[in-house]
Image (cartoon, rainbow, N blue to C red):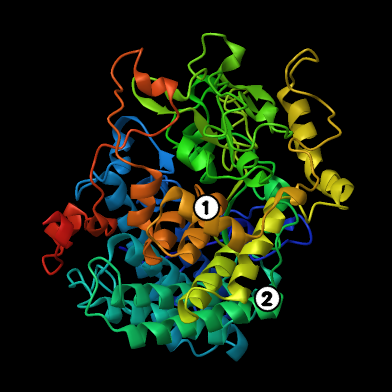
Amino acid sequence: MKTRYILLSAALCSVTGLGLTSCNNEDFLNVTPYNIIEQEQLFDTDAHAKATMNGVYDMLFPNDTYDGDWGFKPNLFTGCHPTIDTQATGWDKDWNSQNWNASSSELLGGWKHVYAGICRANDFLAGLEEAKNLSPAVKKSLEGEGRAVRGFFYHWLATTFGRVPMLSTGENYINTPEKARAATYTEMWDFIIDDFKTAAELLDWQPMDGQYGRATKGMALAYLGDAYMWEAYRLTDGANGQTEDAAKAKQLYQQAAACFKEILDSNTYQLNQSFTTLWDPASAWGPEAIWVEQLDEGTNWGGWGDLTSKLMLKWYTACPENGGWGSLYLSWEWYSCYEKGDKRRAASCYTGAVPQIDPNNEAYDPQYEGWYEPAIYGVNPYLQEVLGHGNPTSKTMAFHFTNGEWAPAIWSSKMWRTASAEYKAWGDGHWSPTPIYWKRLPNVMLDYAECLFRLNGGDDATAWAQIDKLRERAFGKYEAGNEQALTDKYLPYYNSFANWVGRGEDDTFIKNRTEYPIPFGSNDDLRPDAKTYYTQYAADKGFQSEVWKVAVNTERRKEFNCEWCLRPDMQKSGFMADHVATNYPKRNTSTDGDDAPIKNVPWTNRDYDYNDMKMDMPIPQDELLKNTLCDQNPAYK
């Protein structure tokens, strides 16, 4: 970082887009233009100090200086693709076969972006220490926020690259151009733990000034518990880890469980009544959101130069035949892990028309027959777009879409939901109001369950209850009796969108709908209890892991696809190797030619040997050249 001038916005809720819970009004949609504060004014008043902290929050967004796609790349590639549950083609396909390397541009972009944020946080915390004119309450909260955001940046680095250089308060790459990586995982994680522990002590459950977007006690505690679990993982079964210390690991899991219990006992957060609505504009800063990047500029449609529009999620995630670029696909193995009645699948993806699917063949689709879901096949139900434009020769009419290379014919609805990649896409329709969840309540619930299982020999009633509560929501139990209220809240956007795109009355888009695209209502009579179900599921699939580990991580697969935490959570659980071996067995299905056998079967063609050591990504080559004190991870030497 070459200057300490800080970008300022007077309305933090609209600028940072990081949320705690629902805003009570729509003032956050009014964006105040950026201004500049001179260096000598950064900490002379409470207002200026708050504005200075906004310059740290600003690094939570993508920008062209470091990484224009932060929030999608490298986060998708490092946080999801190694699980193979998400896939890619073109130059991105190496992220599905462990062929990434120290020259991967996405790794360098993410590294530079995050260290720029850390340097801003370090400069901010150094200036805050010297500030004399701030009110004690404001100074206390701002220190907590600065420590929490720095911890967040370091958490991404540590869960992506393993050991990294730890720049302390006042250090940046100008005054500290070279620094070695932390000598041990314990040293690194203790640094991060100290940031989150201090932040949790300084911050309140509600954000300062009621501005949803500021770090809170809940955010700090969620990441603190996560950090305790990562340090325990490195002390026990973590690849690239240290000498085993089971006693220390147990203590860390106890500390993590205490963090998660404090969050749950606070009653600050509640599950959304319906999983299907979590990525709707009306769910912005919903009740289960603990830390979320809200990509929403209100009614500010259009403008290729708009900061949040630069992420271009609708193009990255839409079906290529509907105007998308095909950067993200979901696997049929992931698609088939759901039980009949679990609404999370229908709310997470759309498939091509796929005529090969036999509704009576449960090996392909265990939940299709007799359920309400047939419209999901070949249709984006939120936008009522026919995938492949309904063309009978469409490339979506197969298990695997091919556009020169093969990929599953499944696309994520978490990000391609609220803006068409087809209608007005290249004009004034450039708007994708999308939340990128970093932490929501289910993260805490499943982490808490894992800690309890580890501490109590793999069987704990409270832990199973956390999983069952998530499954109740997944099967629509909390929608029952609330159908009309949910419809009134979430349906209007889709009707207004239909009017805005101006489609004709004979178009496939249904105007003035009276029912939410995925109808509200309960399927709870189809839900077995978690312990019974996963005991049988683990045996049938042949997992080597304990039943609890299969249960927690399969629920993570169902909840968190495309949410960047999936690979880190499965890795710290010690489940990645078993997951890849069991859910993605090696196959030699040919992918050559238009008549390739792979298009007639749903399954993924994995032809490489999984290496757990590679879950620590390579330190970027550019960093090694500029910082001679930094060394490379073992798997890449």
Image depth: mark 1 or mark 2 in front: 1
Q: Could you tell me which quadrant the N terminus lies in?
A: bottom left
Viewer can see residue 250: yes
Residue that label 2 marks: 206
Residue nearest the observer in this picture, 140 or 74: 74
Q: Nearer the viewer, residue 44 or 230?
A: 230
Q: Position of residue 582 (x, y in %)?
A: 38, 48
Q: Quadrant of the C terminus?
A: bottom left
Q: On the rendered structure, is 101 left or right of 539?
A: left
Residue in the picture at 55% in, 84% down: 258
Residue with the mark numbered 1: 537
Q: Is residue 178 left or right of residue 304?
A: left
Q: Could you say where residue 583 lies in the image, as x and y percent from the top left?
A: 41, 45
Quadrant location of residue 613?
A: bottom left
Residue kind at label 1, given as amino acid type: Tyr
Q: Which of marks 2 and 1 precedes in the sequence?
A: 2
Q: Give the distance between the C-alpha atoms of the residues marked 1 and 2, in whole angstroms.
A: 41 Å
Q: Is residue 551 left or right of residue 112?
A: right
Residue 521: image tag: none
* Residue visible at 88% across and 53% down in the picture: 481
Q: Amino acid at mark 2?
A: Gln
Q: Is residue 222 above or below residue 92?
A: below
Note whether residue 617 is visible: no
Where disc 2 sits, the SS reads loop
